[in-house]
Image (tube, helix red, strand yellow):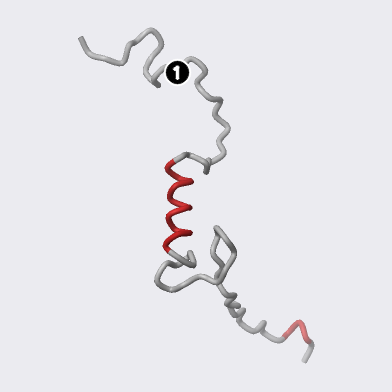
């Protein structure tokens, strides 16, 4: 029997110890994926201050207009 005729064994997932995304210490089950409440709060603060951004292909709106039709104030009269 050739090696190519044998079925491939199923792949097994390898578990690695989760690390805190803020400081790199091992994650605590209570605060997963963080190690402490402090690191979880730091991450929340970064989201609230908009430090994290999702990249897009859209150009930013330079004039601060709402996404309504041109010439429209966006309000019904």
Is 72 located above or below residue 13 in the figure?
above
Is 74 located above or below residue 5 in the figure?
above
Towards the viewer: 6 or 59: 59
**Residue 66, quarter of picture:** top left
Is 58 located above or below residue 21 in the figure?
above
**Residue 9, quarter of picture:** bottom right
What residue is at 38 percent from the left and 7 percent from the top? 71
In the image, residue 27 lies at what x, y percent? 51, 70
* In-image side of 17 versus 74 (left or right): right
Towards the viewer: 73 or 8: 73
* In-image side of 7 versus 77 (left or right): right
Towards the viewer: 2 or 11: 11
In the image, residue 6 lies at what x, y percent? 71, 86
Determine the residue located farthest toward the front in the rendered image: 38
Q: Label 1, on which residue?
A: 64
In the image, residue 44 lies at what x, y percent? 43, 50
């Amino acid at each position: 029997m050739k090696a190519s005729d044998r079925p491939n064994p199923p792949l097994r997932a390898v578990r690695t110890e989760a690390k805190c995304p803020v400081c790199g210490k091992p994650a605590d089950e209570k605060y997963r994926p963080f190690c402490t409440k402090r690191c979880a709060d730091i991450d929340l603060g970064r989201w609230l201050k908009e430090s994290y951004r999702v990249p897009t292909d859209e150009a930013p709106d330079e004039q601060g207009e709402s996404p309504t039709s041109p010439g429209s104030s966006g309000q019904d009269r």
